[in-house]
Image (spheres, rainbow, N blue to C red):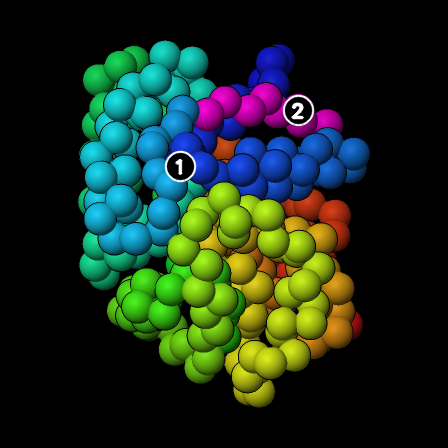
Amino acid sequence: MSRPYRIGQIVPSSNTTMETEIPAMLRAREAVRPERFTFHSSRMRMHKVVKEELEAMNREGLRCAAELADARVDVMSTACLVAIMAMGPGYHRQTESELAEVARANGCSAPVMTSAGALIEGLQELGARRISLMAPYMRPLTELVVQYIESEGIEVVDAMSFEIPDNLEVGLRDPMQLVRDVERLDTRNVDAVVLSACVQMPSLPAIQPVQDRLGIPVISTAVCTVRAMLDRLELEPVVPGAGALLGGISR
């Protein structure tokens, strides 16, 4: 491609992390591969991570898909995991179909994906059958995420909830705190650890250090989103320092 790849994201209005970590990973990739990227977003209103606001936010997704279609992005992804998983097992497939229909109606042929589906794909790519995860959600929402993942045939051995309802506060959390938090997570006999099951809880700087310490694959929803984007763009899934799913090797 003669021009940079255009990365399109449908982002919750209070999310400050996906427009930080996704570009950071793809900029790191630019240091070792020739492809270049630009980043484009459309926003859905959401302040509190509660089911009522998540449902209302989901209804704005079709408008966002039409807006990103106007930019002729090369891949389009939602950037909220729990809004999809809270709607029930398999919902990411319905969302992807609905968003793709709007994109096509507006002249955009880009592959359409969700961060929720990307997490499932990433775990499947790793062959992970037993995992542990950490999330900032209130416990009932974390339980919905666990049920969703388990409906895809992946056992969740342990799930830690930090119970932070304000989405802006989630985005302000120090990612390196996860290095200490993971010590309280049961990681015995698991195939992978999801360091952040939330696209708003920052985790990128901690991914590789925690993986190096545990000796098993460590991922996040943001890492899985980048992997799924690169797969759909048919580009080599390599990002330095971003864990096993993007080419980092466990020790």
Examine the rendering and report whether any part of residue 56 can be seen. Answer: yes
Answer whether residue 20 is magenta in the image.
no
Q: Which of disc 1 and disc 2 is earlier in sequence?
A: 1
In the drawing, does residue 165 fall left or right of residue 32? left
Q: Which residues are magenta?
A: 33-41
The residue singled out by tag 2 in the image is: 36
Q: Tell me which residue sits at (36%, 51%) in the image.
A: 49
Vertical relation: 50 (above or below) 64 = below
Q: Tell me which residue sits at (46%, 59%) in the image.
A: 164
Q: Give whichever of 110, 57 is nearer the camera.
A: 57
Residue 141 percent across, percent down from the top left: 32, 63
Q: Give whichever of 157, 37 is nearer the camera.
A: 157
Q: Tell me which residue sits at (28%, 32%) in the image.
A: 61
Q: Badge 1: few (under 14), some or many (20 or more) residues near its Cα, within 10 Å?
A: many
Q: Are marks 2 and 1 in contact (CB under 8 Å)?
A: no
* Whole-number angstrom distance, CA of label 2 to CA of label 1: 25 Å
In the drawing, does residue 69 fall left or right of residue 159? left
Residue 215 percent across, percent down from the top left: 70, 75
Q: Tell me which residue sits at (42%, 15%) in the image.
A: 72
Amino acid type, mark 1: Pro
